[in-house]
């Protein structure tokens, strides 16, 4: 019986298989990187706000504590957004006539809240509780970055499930003394013994429980 395919067909078949494997691997890499990119996660992208509130000025320069504005961060799931009254506590005297702050004054006069653009926005199917994390030794900067040096707040982490799980699988490296919770420039130089002590003090649950689906999806 005559040979149907030329001998070179073997080499072509091998090259085609190798090319298909390479393209599949390359496609997988591109997809995974795209899924983590700022284009899809919104990380490192500044959002335009009604008032260009500078955390660097208020927190970094003036030393205002996070809890002055985010009053419920230690007690409820939401950190809370400050009412305009909080702004006016200072700005009824400082920059009281500045055109730049007319939006704030109008909000106060009309008793209508300022419509801020949300920066950190988790999907509705994810349950996140600020108070649990704060009271278990997780600092603000662990999720929000060095807010005290941000003129405009932007998202510094992907907020994807793999990012959350990386912390839940290894909580010892992500907790700090409670005196440093609101220090956004804190650097973790704790010893293993100190980490172990904090884990016991905060009564951190086992890794198996922290990574259970029902912990975040309820």
Image: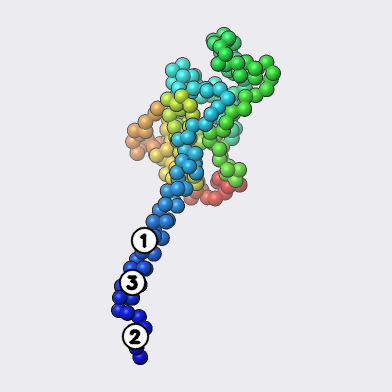
Q: In which quarter of the image is the N terminus?
A: bottom left
Q: Based on the displayed image, in which of its 4 quarters is residue 99 positioned?
A: top right
Number of residue marks: 3
Numbered disc 3: secondary structure: helix
Residue lying at 42% horizontally and 38% vertically, measured from the top left: 174
Numbered disc 2: secondary structure: loop
Q: Distance between the residues labelled 2 and 1?
A: 30 Å
Q: Where is residue 166 in the image (x, y as percent from the top left)?
A: 44, 45
Crowding at mark 2 (Cα within 10 Å: few <14, some 14-19, many 20+): few
Closer to us: 103 or 211: 103
Q: How far apart are marks 2 and 3 (CA)?
A: 16 Å
Q: Are marks 2 and 3 in contact (CB under 8 Å)?
A: no
Closer to us: 10 or 113: 10
Residue lying at 62% horizontally and 15% vertically, measured from the top left: 105
Say above or below: 103 vs 206: above
Numbered disc 1: secondary structure: helix
Query: Which residue position holds label 3?
Result: 12
Say above or below: 65 vs 96: below
- Regarding residue 71, the answer to whether it shows in the image is no
First-in-chain label (2 vs 1): 2
Q: Based on the displayed image, in which of its 4 quarters is residue 157 positioned?
A: top left
Query: Which residue position holds label 1?
Result: 22
Crowding at mark 3 (Cα within 10 Å: few <14, some 14-19, many 20+): few
């Amino acid at each position: 019986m005559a040979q149907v395919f030329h001998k070179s067909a073997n080499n072509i078949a091998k090259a085609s298989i190798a090319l298909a494997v390479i393209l599949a691997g390359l496609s997988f890499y591109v997809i995974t990187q795209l899924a983590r990119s700022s284009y899809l996660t919104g990380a490192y992208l500044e959002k335009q706000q009604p008032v260009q509130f500078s955390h660097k000025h208020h927190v970094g320069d003036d030393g205002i504590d996070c809890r002055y504005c985010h009053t419920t961060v230690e007690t409820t799931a939401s950190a809370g957004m400050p009412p305009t009254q909080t702004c006016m506590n200072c700005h009824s005297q400082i920059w009281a006539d500045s055109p730049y702050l007319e939006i704030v004054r109008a909000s106060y006069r009309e008793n209508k809240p300022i419509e801020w653009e949300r920066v950190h926005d988790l999907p509705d199917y994810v349950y996140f509780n600020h108070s649990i994390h704060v009271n278990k030794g997780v600092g603000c900067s662990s999720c929000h970055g060095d807010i005290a040096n941000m003129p405009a707040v932007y998202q510094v982490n992907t907020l994807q499930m793999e990012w959350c799980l990386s912390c839940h699988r290894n909580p010892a490296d992500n907790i700090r003394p409670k005196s440093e919770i609101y220090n956004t420039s804190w650097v973790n130089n704790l010893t293993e013994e100190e980490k172990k002590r904090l884990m016991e003090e905060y009564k951190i649950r086992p890794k198996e429980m922290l990574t259970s689906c029902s912990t975040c999806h309820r």
